[in-house]
Image: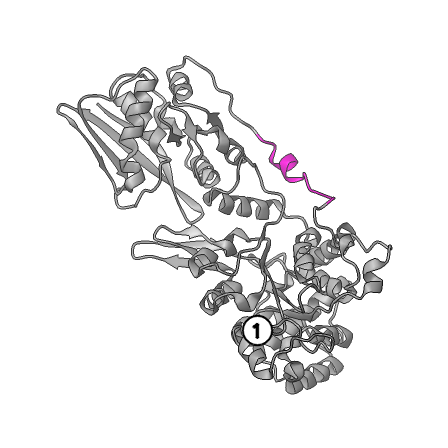
Amino acid sequence: MLVKVFGSAVFGVEATTITVEVNIDKGIGYHLVGLPDNAIKESSYRIAAALKNNGYAMPGKKITINMAPADLRKEGSAYDLTLTIGILVASGQIKADEVDKYIIMGELSLDGSLQPIRGALPIAIKAKEEGFKGFFLPKQNVKEAAIVAGLDVYGVENVQEVIDFLEGKGTLEPTTIDTRAEFYKTLDFPEFDFSDVKGQESIKRCMEIAAAGGHNIILIGPPGAGKTMLAKRLPSILPPMTLREALETTKIHSVAGKLKEVGLMNQRPFRSPHHTISNVALVGGGSYPQPGEISMAHNGVLFLDELPEFKRDVLEVMRQPLEDREVTISRAKFTVTYPSSFMLVASMNPSPSGFFNDPDSPQTSSPHEMQRYLSKISGPLLDRIDIHIEVTPVPFEKLSEDQKAESSVDIRKRVTAAREIQTERFEQMENIHYNAQMNTKHIREHCALDDASKQLLKTAMERLNLSARAYDRILKVARTIADLDAAPTVISSHIAEAIQYRSLDRDGWLG
């Protein structure tokens, strides 16, 4: 008897429906075809034990299973449940007339219970698109899949529950989630708050500008100046995610298997990889591509602490994703694209000892040592960072004062107001939502300068020997400063402030 059941494979952040054809005939043997990997080939042992422990049996006949389309590589143990149900129906051990109306996915334990799978959200989205009635999956993944309205999502704990439901012997309640209610559970009391930071008013201003325009930022300062402390608080002033951004972010984390019984993600991600990270772990990839840290930080913040400590080739692979806001990983037989629109926040010491131009420090570095240290970061990468700011240690008087600093919630109100201006400005544009995403054409249109501003910028360009990309960065930052002031045009004071935030372009910075 031939039976068709349906599963799904995830490539990039999109799912493809897989038809599992099970044919049971005279003879003996178990034949699995359609480019399965080792985890799927081993499934016969898990399936046999799970069936025996639940009162069923592996048919002692010739079992042929084809996973179509046969030219797509299938990976992982998530097809265990799909194959099990197919074998039971094809061997006549259960009667399930509507089995072809459901997507069935789950990894089996030997006792028939189910283990969580990856990519439940993209699979549910595809199932709804293709008109399936429902989706059976492990209970641990049910919240992420239930985000999709118009699809019956059943979270099950073991294979017996699925069998009983398909035979009409038992009932299962589909899980429903009010996506909007889930999404608007925002936190107004963030774990890390800017009110904890004493002094550093100019750095906080920089952070506010970076958050308002989505600009990349690098903090340069000696150890203990508060670089990491400030960076960790940046997500608390970013505007709340839109529903579209929340779905995009949840999809990536679902594919990576990082959701852990969470429904819709409503907080912007903050990723802080260690400097020993490999380039594949950072941008994604592997023989079977998975999203890397830059995609996990999509719509959030990627924090690279001690930037010069990262391997140079690791930093260089970020250049293209920083510009294109997506990363394409190519393999011989297929190509996947992961979104990677993130804010890069980097920190570094100004010299190997960490104490640059500090008269009180006994540790000093020679100009040659400093040049070698800074040369680990390439010019093209620094060009892609809009704001460079020096962080100086906080004096004792500021540290010991009792006055509480401005809270993240208050700063976020100003940032959100500036972002709303940008949303309105780029309403007609599909892939542009804030100032940092502008290309040259948009910069010319939205950052028109008067004569005084042009002269000021010309002088700065000549004196600091800035590149054309740095010129564009200054204009983008100036546009964001104008938005924070709710000013319709960019004026010379906005340009002057934006020029200050290019520390590493100054010729005299080393000396």
Residue at the limit of the structure toward the top, as seen here: 169
Residue in front for this viewpoint, 158 or 334: 158
Magenta-tinted stretch: 177-189
Q: Identify the residue at image location x=69%, y=63%.
A: 224
The N terminus is located in which quarter?
top left
Residue found at x 51% / y 24%: 174
Q: Residues within 10 Å of mark 1 (few under 14, many from 20)?
A: many
Q: Nearer the viewer, residue 265 or 404?
A: 404
Point out residue 346 in the picture as x, y percentages from the top left corner: 60, 64
Q: Could you say where residue 433 lies in the image, as x and y percent from the top left?
A: 61, 57
Rendered position, 158 above or below 55: below
Q: Is residue 404 magenta?
A: no
- The x, y position of residue 47, in whole percent, is 30, 27
Query: Mark 1 is on which residue type?
Result: Asp
Q: Secondary structure at mark 1?
A: helix
**Main SS type for the magenta part?**
loop
Give the side of residue 285 with respect to residue 407, left or right.
Answer: left
394 or 283: nearer the eye? 394
Residue 430 location, x and y as percent? 56, 56
Residue placed under numbered mark 1 in the picture = 383
Q: Residue furthest front?
A: 362
Q: Is residue 444 visible?
A: no
Question: Was residue 180 drawn as part of the magenta stretch in this picture?
Answer: yes
Residue in the picture at 55% in, 69% down: 308
Figure coloring: one colour
